[in-house]
Image: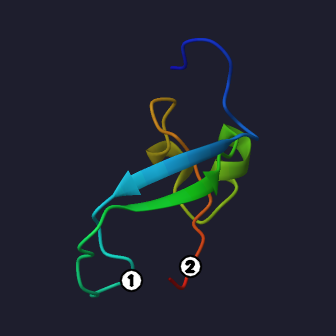
């Protein structure tokens, strides 16, 4: 549940040291990516089972980036 306004349609920032590709190396410096935040309706229209997507989740569009 969101405190305040629904973030759908806005941009979120994800920060971390996670892998930048499947099976890739861990980066030595923190990474940052900006992602669009989707509405519940948009997210449930994608390939994931609708019942697995809850109101407690931030729904973003996966973007493949080549760093």
Q: Secondary structure at mark 2?
A: loop
Q: Residues within 10 Å of mark 1 (few under 14, many from 20)?
A: few
Q: Residue 49, labelled with which disc?
A: none
Task: Please give the label number shown on residue 65.
Answer: 2
Q: Nearer the viewer, residue 36 or 59?
A: 36
Would you say 33 lies left or right of 6 here?
A: left
Q: Mark 2 or 1 closer to N-term? A: 1
Q: CA distance from mark 2 to mark 1?
A: 9 Å
Residue 61: x %, y % from top left: 62, 59
> In the rendering, at what x and y percent does residue 39 appear?
70, 40
Residue occupying image coordinates x 23% and y 73%: 28
| Mark identifier at residue 21 | 1
**Residue at (60% x, 71% y) in the render:** 63
Q: In the picture shown, does residue 2 fall above or below 64? A: above
Vertical placement of 28 versus 23: above or below? above
Q: Residue at x 54, y 13 (%)?
A: 3
Residue 49, given in percent of the width and then of the height, sits at 52, 56
Q: Position of residue 21 (x, y in %)?
A: 38, 83
């Amino acid at each position: 549940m969101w405190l305040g306004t629904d973030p759908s349609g806005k941009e979120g920032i994800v920060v971390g040291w996670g892998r930048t590709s499947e099976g890739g190396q861990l980066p030595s410096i923190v990474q940052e990516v900006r992602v669009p935040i989707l509405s519940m309706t948009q997210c449930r229209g994608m390939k994931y089972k609708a019942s697995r997507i809850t109101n407690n989740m931030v729904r973003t569009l996966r973007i493949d980036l080549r760093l």
